[in-house]
Image (cartoon, grey):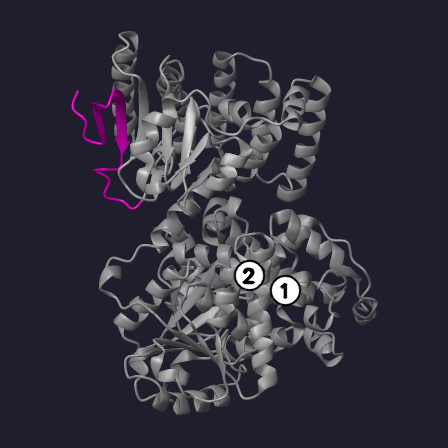
Amino acid sequence: MSYENLTVETKDDLFWIGFGKYEKKSMTTFTRETLLELRQAILEAAELDKRSAVKGLVFFSHKPGVFLAGVDISVINSLKTEAEALRALDEAHTIFNALDDLKMPTVALVDGICLGGGLELSLACKKIFVSDNPKTALGLPEVMLGVLPGFGGTYRLPRKVGLPTALDMILTGKQVKGKNALKLGLADAMLPTERMRELAKAYLLEKKTGKRKSVKEEVQAAAMDNFLTRKIIFQKAREKVLESTKGFYPAPLKILEVLESGAGKGRSDYLALEAQAFAELSQSVQSKNLQHIFFLTDASKKLDNKDQLPTVHRGAVLGAGVMGGGIAWLFAQNNQAPLMKDLTPAALELGLKQASQNFSAALKKRRLSEDEFNRKMRSIEPTLSFEGLRSADLVVEAVVENMDVKKKVFAELEGHVRPDAMLTSNTSSLSVEEMSKALQRPERFAGLHFFNPVNKMPLVEIITHERASKDTIDALVKWVLDVKKTPIVVKDGPGFLVNRILAPYLNEAAFLLEEGVTIEALDEAALNFGMPMGPCRLMDEIGLDVCVKVGKIMHDGLGDRALPSELSTKLYEAKLLGKKNGRGFYLYDEKGKVTGKNPDVVKLLTAKKLRRDEMELQMRLFLPMVNEAAYIFADRIVDKAATVDIGMIYGTGFPPFRGGLCRWADQEGLDQIAERLHNFTKDVSAARYSIAPFLSLMVADKKKFYDL
């Protein structure tokens, strides 16, 4: 058999199997073809092993920084039945078991990314050597796709690193850096990146490699064999899983079930359990939805002309508040040495404090060294003048959310920057089209909407307008990708995409409170739908003052269906602003933690307390979002359901296991959603629940959002 995906050769008394030489993608993955060739290569190795023709087997990668990024997701996605999944896993287990059964020494030389099936292959080897490359990371992320490791990972990892460490890795999908892999016993040696292959033979054939177990580790290993100890570990793990997932994600619980019921079983019986569990999970709605999100996210990161676009070397931020400081942090984090301008030293101090807090969080978690912390903070240059802005490739305006102020800032700014510099506004709701009128070069201008906090929120909305050039928008997409955020491109309109769809959700929450639904019932209904926090907590996070301002903009732009509730205005007038001043729907301590419900808000909620069915509350909250999505398509703010779903998942935390707002609506049935909306027009509000004409048209044509 000829090899088209692997390299296979015998050299220096070793059998070498290489990945990635012919891979065109940035990440090397297992495809069906690669697995077929791997089976043949291991058969060759077994034949050599029988004849003692070589002294060992070495797996390596031709692609720097990537060993193996796991199985190509399209392979998992192509499995249409449990039976098909079982057949595929049976073939994979045969391959990996054959590797496991080789008598000769075997090793995986891991340089860079080693995830999923890549780590499972490594675990089937007798040894794992990692490089000292800071990009080297090992992990089993399958849980994030709603499945479990299916190539023997749940069987071999606990035997390599112990049950507690294995559970932590498999249940969270977290990645372990090379140095930590050595410390945990996952890796047997760490070698210099540039000399890995050169040193492989000596280290592979050496009798003693890796870290010797301490007395404490030996005691822990013995404890793992104790039934009672294992029972306690699994009980605690199950409690933690249910607390973090609320039971919405079946994969973590199935992982625990397999590991617990498989304890003490032989390899063959255990792997049969693992395969059956994988097959069941792979066909679940949750897994299909999580795979769907993976493909959407992957597609959003593709830019065909990326190599032809300019790179931002230096950024600048106008406005040094909490948001400005967060944006300055983002520039500095990505080595783009930003200028940060404001009108007063006190404002600059606030921006620097915010950037420092973000870096300090990474320092505390040891994701950043002390030297890196100091270097990155020094790279932020505070200034009270426009001097130096000619060196900036990208300027982000983050001043007060007022159209007149912003237009005045841009009119003055344009004379202080290069003609080729990109100018952007971090606005959450104001018209980018209107702002562009203040500029002589509007083609170099666009909206760049960040979400707070910048260091945690992955989404950036890029808002285009009639005179924005394609090159400018493409360059901004490239920059967002370069700073490791997820971009969506949307057209101008009230609230753009995310805030426009979020507004009716928050507004309806306020109307429900006015009707007598309690804060607890409302937030709990949203949490039980899968949202990361309830609407009341979210309004506190955003700020009630901001909610009032955005609500007015939405009403002015969208009419009666966006009529704001009077409750937000009452709270604002009572100076109950939310988390920013410690008093909103909830009370907050100095560190921003909730200390209880705010009695002042309860007094304002004078309506008689009503008990409503939780399903009704959820429909009242989420159906207006679907309806507004239909209006967005009609207004051509976006033209793909994928853009809406990426925006809602990464911008608002819409439950990933539901696949996104549009996918959820498609799965519920648009005809059913239209019927429920119609019923609410009779029972609640004709204006707020009037069915979008575009939604009615889709129902009549039997179309779904994902048919658009």
Res. 426 visible in picture: yes
- Asked whether the beta carbons under mark 2 and mark 1 sit within 8 Å of each other, the answer is yes
Three-letter amino acid code at disc 1? Glu
Quadrant in which the N terminus appears = top left
Q: In front here: 329 or 632? A: 329
468 above or below 108? below
Residue extending furthest toward the left? 2
Secondary structure under the numbered disc 1 in the rendered image:
helix
Report the amino acid beneath label 2: Pro
Instruction: Name the residue at 81% across, 60% down.
Output: 609
Residue 639 percent coordinates (x, y): 35, 61
Can you identify the residue that label 1 sits on? Answer: 508
- Pinpoint residue 364: horizontal percent, then vertical percent: 61, 55
Establish if 661 lies above or below 56.
below
Which quarter of the rendering shows the C terminus?
Answer: bottom left
Residue sitting at 60 percent across and 18 percent down?
A: 263
| Magenta span contains residue 62 | no
Q: Residues within 10 Å of mark 1 (few under 14, many from 20)?
A: many
Q: Which residues are magenta?
A: 1-26
Locate residue 264: give its quadrant. Answer: top right
Q: Residue at x 69, y 68 (%)?
A: 579
State which quadrant residue 191 falls in.
Answer: top left
Q: What residue is shown with label 2?
A: 624
